[in-house]
Image (cartoon, rainbow, N blue to C red):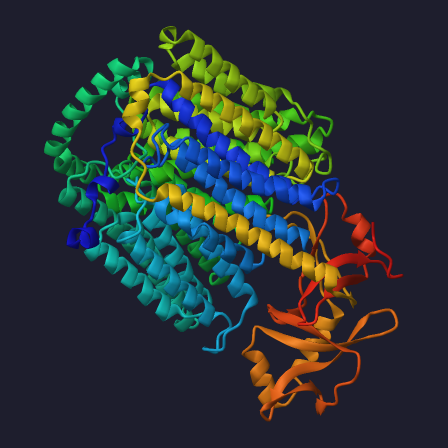
Amino acid sequence: MREMIRGAYPSMQVMNPDKTNVWPTDWRVFLTKLAWGLAVLLLASGLVTWIAANWANWGHVVKFALAQGAVLISAGLALVFRRRAGGWGHDLGVPAALTGLAAVATGGLLALIGQTYQTGADPWQLFALWTVLIIPWVFTVRSVFLSVLWLVLINTALYLWIDVTRLGWFDRTYTSQTLMALGANAILLLAAETIWRARQDPWRILPRVAAIAVGFFIGTQLMEGEFLLSMVLFLVLYGIYHFRRPDLLIMSLASLGAYLSLSILIIEHAGDSFLLIVVVIVGLGLGLLRFLQQQVVKWRRTHGGGSLTTQETSPAGATRHADEGPQEAAKTEATAASVASTAANSSNKAQAEAAEAQGSDEHHPWYLRLIKLFLFLLLPLIILLYLTVSLDLSLEVLGVLGAIMALVSPVLSAKAKTVPSRDMVGGWVACAVLLLSAPVVDMRYPWPHEVSAMLAVVISTLLYRQAKGQFVLRMLLVIWALAAIEFLVIERLFDRWTMMPYWVLEMPAAFMFFAALLLGHFYLRDGKKSSFWQPLFWSLLLVAQVHIVSAGTLFFSMPFWDETRPYLTPTGSLLAMAPVAILAFYWRGWREQPLVYGLALLGLAALCAVWTPYPPVALALSWILAAYAWRYLSLMAVAVAMGLFCLWRLYYILNISLLDKAELLLATGVGCLVFAYLGQLGRKKAVTESTVKAAPKGIVASVLLGTVLILGVANTVIAQKERILAQGQTVLLELAPVDPRSLMQGDYMSLNFALSQDLSYLAWRLPGEVVSQIESQRWVMAGVQLDENKVAHLKGIYAKFNGQEHLMGEEGPIAEQAGVLKLRMRRHRNSWAPGTDAWFFAEGSAERYEAARYGEFAVVEDGQSLLRDMLDKDRQEIK
């Protein structure tokens, strides 16, 4: 128990560059797992999108049946497949994946209930109830996905609750709520580090996500002006993960948070001493960077874990595992692992010392590189602000100063031999780049933009060659050059030739993608010159993905800004072929399994063909396949993140209807499910049985219990809402709508009722005793009276006064008149709302509801209400 509380688990944090132990040894196994993962992801996304579409042609009974069927079928299939593909004990096993799909479907079912009965847009109660209902699955299945989903749901509920609720413990607006959320996440973090752990979590994803949530709510204290408190809390978090359970990722983020808190505290109390502020903040930033680098070196020396970063490529021998059969690959992998382990244990300290002596950051972990990139952007910006504000230097002078700094940079780079000196030079170069870019913004250079772009490419190329051992600086230089080409050349071409076809805009992304692919094939997969080419590779990869995702929206001055994106383009078709070509090229052992090879190519080609109109998916899929072929774990992580981002952004693309998106997602998800099942069928029985683990005790019962609980609660809520609609008295409220999009429930109008404004006005003019009482409540009971058109008018608020409940008005207690109806109003931000604050409608119906002037509610005797319909100015239902 003591080791469980204090253990550092160095093997889970520090792994050798050759991570062959985490890779499937056969393309067939990998593609089967990939198909299962894609099936769950696409089906879950399709379900949410289908619910958000709010298709009016389907009755709510059919929708409820389909949503509940999704939960029931997913959980049922998880039980059916509990003895296949890893069983419950494997986090990537089919049962765990299907249970995760059932958990997502549960949220879809709750969102559908809220959408159907108009209970409000993204209410915190939806996410809180979702969190509670999947508890039996979370704590028995204990997969990483379910656990992280549960953490995200809890924090989403907390965030939405903070947004609409007030507590009066402190003077500041949200301090009370954020402290409560911080305490809740601290408890969850403690549980994640002790009694609540995922079954397979070698990268400590669950506790790290919990720690990030803790850091987020500490950061909210910083935003609330509690600078000293946030700094102390960040230092406490650092101390825990330095002394009790060492974790460099959490230590680094906590250190960065403490630095930002201290910097803002200095700005707050330094007054007009701008120079002092700049010197102290820049000095602290460089000190923070050096401190974290020393922690990395110390970790290597103490734990002997080899490389901390997952951004290193594996040796050529590891790459060849993908070309061998399962048995040969397993033998080769076992031999390689044994040799690598022996060699690593004897040379880890020497490697760490050598890397330190060389002054290189190429072996730093990815999070330290991100912090370094952040500082390289923040600190030069602070210096630029000082030069422009305090010294009143013109943009032309800043450009000249930047040119001088750039000319001196090669000399400084040649002299710098240690990590601190090279970091200083890196900051110098970043500042030079920023100063050189400043005059371009206001077109102060006396030459065309094309010349500026060419100069940026030349300067960045020269400085790139000089920046030895500076991964972050080299990546920054490449991005600077690519941005110069992007904004100074490509955009101007479209300004001049407005008739250029759309696909030309996508060509730069395709060019960068294939350039990165060639770089990875020739220089990264076998480790040759990786330190020189890696920054260029990653820059091309990321910029290409951002470019293709943002095409048509990033360049706001393009002539086709308001045009619908073409369904098929030459560039999109070319990129759609890339995943198929990658699989065909790298699967060199296909002769042993020709039928499987053919089916895999066919399935992948079909998937890419369907997604041709949305090229970002093909790019992400290409990098997933390349990452497996090269055994490049960081590339795999980034590719998966890019795929998730692409699907998230797809939800908000407006030139494709939600229903079309849902059909596309669900169809491809079912296709992936079929191919995953086919891939599972043909595996040898011995291999399949070797991966199956016995189901943990009670897990079948918990899955059944969770399913019954979810369906029971959902149908109880549905019955309750139907009773209100059937028995409620008709009440009309005046409104003033607007039109955003909900997180999970689709398009809606945000409703601002006249009654809510009247109630807020009255609440501040009641006697002090009543005002204090109302301020402490989350809901109040309003007294309303209906006119001849059934439009409600506020008469007062029911509250206790002198020990008895009265209907209170501005002048005090008023006599309750006949026909006064109770209406329950809940606190919503700084106002009050009845049963809902939104009206959901089918996508594309926004114009129809622009004429809405009244909301028709069904109100029952205890004051509960549901929104039935929207009415026009003549109080007629809008259809």
Image position of 389 (left or right of 308): right
Q: Position of residue 252 (x, y in %)?
A: 30, 51
Q: Position of residue 490 (x, y in %)?
A: 61, 31
Label count reads 0
Q: Residue furthest bottom?
A: 802
Residue 293 seen in this snapshot: yes
Q: Position of residue 768 (x, y in %)?
A: 60, 89
Image position of 679 (left or right of 239): right
Q: Position of residue 854 (x, y in %)?
A: 80, 63
Identify which residue is drawn at 21% across, 54% down: 5
Residue 652 seen in this snapshot: no
Q: Height in image: 782 above or below 467?
A: below
Image position of 792 (left or right of 98): right
Q: Residue furthest top?
A: 591
**Viewer-closest of 504 and 79:** 79
Identify which residue is drawn at 68% across, 60% down: 723
Residue 873 figure quarter: bottom right
Identify which residue is drawn at 21% across, 40% down: 11
**Viewer-closest of 142 and 758:** 142
Residue 417 figure quarter: top left
Identify which residue is drawn at 62% across, 51% down: 113
**Viewer-closest of 706 and 226:** 706
